[in-house]
């Protein structure tokens, strides 16, 4: 087949890419905001257009054929080019009104971003904000978000990052639960406490043992990766948890003797998007207000 004469349709290639990366028509359709029949027709039309079978269909499973595997890197390169085009267009405008997508951890999204967004919308009511509260790191390079608050420095050269003043966390519990533990005069006294774990890994036990608190498997009766659920469990007296200092001091009771836990805060965006006036305004306001809200600015 002479591919120089193919009238290429990017929407069909995008349907192929989403299907290949998600592994199913239904998941790809959800990702692209299409119905499954529509997406299936786009993939079938691409196969007919190219004269190639891109997927082997066995029941509900889709497996890339050798031809599909060979074309997948090309489709990804096209997607990257489309995103670069979109980023460049965003950087060429001085328009303020429009949408900004900010991603942050569940805790930051719930406690730190609301006063920042409130001020942003008072100053610039035309800026529409979407907040993605997720403890997983969104891919800024692929435009899953415009601006991110992270606790690790990104290593992608396509991203720009500004380190903000360090935050800090401490261990907290409800007043009743801490009182139920009896006098806490030595770190060893905390070995009888229950702690709220993130998951089944050993990070929290190692941290506590480093502080001098002996723990066993029974020390961690509850685990959740959702920080807001952990916050509610802690407030309900079900255990001790680690939270950022300003919020913990306002709403919970600080556990005696345990030291502060410092952690870095990074403000991140794609380097092309830094040229957008709307994003610069949002970036600058977050950079200015986060230090005022952080533990490092307010802890004793």
Image (cartoon, helix red, strand yellow):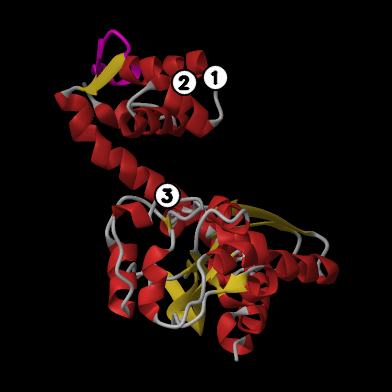
Total tally of numbered discs in the picture: 3
Q: Secondary structure at mark 1?
A: loop
Which residue lies at the image location 48% right of the left edge and 25% below the top edge?
29
* Badge 3 density bin: few <14, some 14–19, many ≥20, Cα 10 Å: some
Which residue lies at the image location 48% right of the left edge and 77% below the top edge?
184
Instruction: Give the alpha-carbon distance from disc 3 to disc 2, as whole Å.
Output: 39 Å
Residue at numbered disc 1: 35
Q: Report if residue 197 is visible in the image.
A: yes
Q: Is residue 217 above or below residue 283?
A: above
Residue at numbered disc 2: 39
Q: Are marks 2 and 1 in contact (CB under 8 Å)?
A: yes
Towards the viewer: 211 or 30? 211
* Badge 1 density bin: few <14, some 14–19, many ≥20, Cα 10 Å: few
Residue at numbered disc 3: 223
Q: Examine the structure image and report whether residue 57 is included in the region drawn in magenta.
A: yes
Q: Examine the structure image and report whether residue 221 is included in the region drawn in magenta.
A: no
| Sooner in the amino-acid sequence: mark 3 or mark 2 | 2
């Amino acid at each position: 087949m002479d591919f120089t004469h193919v009238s290429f349709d990017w929407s069909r290639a995008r349907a192929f890419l989403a299907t290949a990366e998600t592994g199913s028509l239904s998941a790809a359709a959800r990702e692209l905001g299409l119905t499954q029949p529509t997406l299936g027709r786009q993939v079938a039309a691409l196969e007919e257009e190219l004269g190639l079978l891109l997927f082997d269909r066995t029941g509900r499973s889709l497996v890339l054929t050798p031809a599909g595997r060979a074309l997948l890197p090309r489709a990804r390169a096209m997607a990257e080019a489309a995103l670069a085009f979109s980023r460049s267009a965003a950087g060429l405008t001085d328009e303020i009104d429009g949408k900004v997508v900010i991603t942050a951890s569940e805790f930051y999204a719930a406690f730190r971003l609301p006063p920042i967004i409130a001020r942003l919308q008072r100053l610039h009511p035309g800026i529409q904000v979407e907040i993605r509260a997720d403890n997983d790191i969104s891919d800024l390079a692929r435009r899953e978000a415009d601006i991110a608050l992270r606790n690790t420095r990104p290593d992608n050269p396509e991203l720009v990052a500004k380190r903000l003043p360090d935050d800090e966390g401490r261990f907290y519990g409800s007043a009743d639960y801490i009182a139920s533990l009896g006098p806490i005069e030595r770190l060893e006294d905390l070995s009888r406490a229950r702690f709220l774990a993130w998951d089944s890994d050993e990070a929290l036990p190692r941290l506590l043992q480093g502080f001098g608190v002996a723990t066993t498997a029974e020390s961690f009766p509850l685990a959740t990766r959702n920080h807001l659920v952990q916050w509610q469990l802690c407030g309900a007296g079900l255990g001790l948890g680690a939270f950022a200092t300003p919020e913990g001091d306002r709403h919970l009771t600080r556990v005696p003797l345990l030291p502060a836990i410092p952690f870095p805060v990074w403000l991140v965006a794609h380097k092309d998007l830094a040229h957008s006036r709307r994003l610069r305004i949002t970036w600058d306001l977050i950079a200015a207000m986060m230090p005022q809200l952080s533990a490092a600015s307010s802890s004793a």
